[in-house]
Image: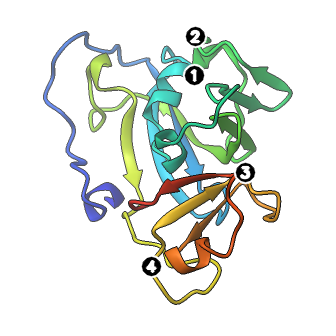
Amino acid sequence: MNAEKNGLNAKVPEKSGEELPWDKVLVTFTFYHPVHKFKTQEWLITEDNTFEDLHQSVQCLANFCEFGVGSEKVVFRIGEAIIKNLKTEISQIPLKIGEIYTYLHKGICQHDMIVSDIRLLNKNDPQSLSHYPFCLFSSKTKRRTCELCSKSHAKFVLFNNRLIPIAFLYLCENCLNLFETSTSEVYPYLYD
């Protein structure tokens, strides 16, 4: 299983908490990197989970940064529906397998996401509600190289700089010093 390959314990957890009925619908959401568009995570959730549950599960570097006013803004765009009330249950929104949806968090970081599976609970799934959302896949963490010189390891992430056409840029210390950063936000880069 992919999750085992990526260091996650993909074993089905022991039974605990509220047991799910066999007719419980499960949905798999796949998330992609906001810039490079590779698959980063896959989450299995129940139809009763909320978009807040899904939001709290997704791991992204932007979650460690503060962006000022409006930075707590979280929006899911599912087809024509724009979900701002994260207490909305997944079952209340029509979903289509394979359609590209949007997850926007921190007011600036936008991920493509798709529904890759909709199915009923089976014996190989966690049987307790307390285990959901359940991570099926998480890409390996890696150290990025500087996106400007492509030679050194990135040590900083530059956000909101008027000279870059994307939301953020991974930079080594030498390349960061090339930018005027008084109107930008700079954070230490740990890993992806």
User: N-terminal of the two: label 3 or label 2?
Assistant: 2
Q: Are marks 1 and 4 in contact (CB under 8 Å)?
A: no
Residue closest to the eye, 122 or 166: 166
Q: CA distance from mark 2 to mark 4?
A: 40 Å
Can residue 109 be seen?
yes
Mark 4, other Cα within 10 Å: few <14 / some 14–19 / many ≥20: some
The residue singled out by tag 4 in the image is: 153
Q: CA distance from mark 4 to mark 3?
A: 21 Å
Instruction: Name the image quarter holding residue 108.
Output: top right
Circle 2: residue type = Lys
The numbered disc on residue 51 is: 1
Q: Are marks 1 and 2 in contact (CB under 8 Å)?
A: yes
Mark 3, other Cα within 10 Å: few <14 / some 14–19 / many ≥20: some
Secondary element at image label 4: loop
Q: CA distance from mark 1 to mark 4?
A: 35 Å
Mark 2, other Cα within 10 Å: few <14 / some 14–19 / many ≥20: few
Q: Residue reaching furthest right?
A: 80
Q: Comparing marks 1 and 4, which lies closer to the viewer? A: 4
The numbered disc on residue 87 is: 2
User: N-terminal of the two: label 2 or label 4?
Assistant: 2
User: N-terminal of the two: label 1 or label 2?
Assistant: 1
Q: Residue reaching furthest bottom?
A: 151
The residue singled out by tag 3 in the image is: 160
Can residue 26 be seen?
no
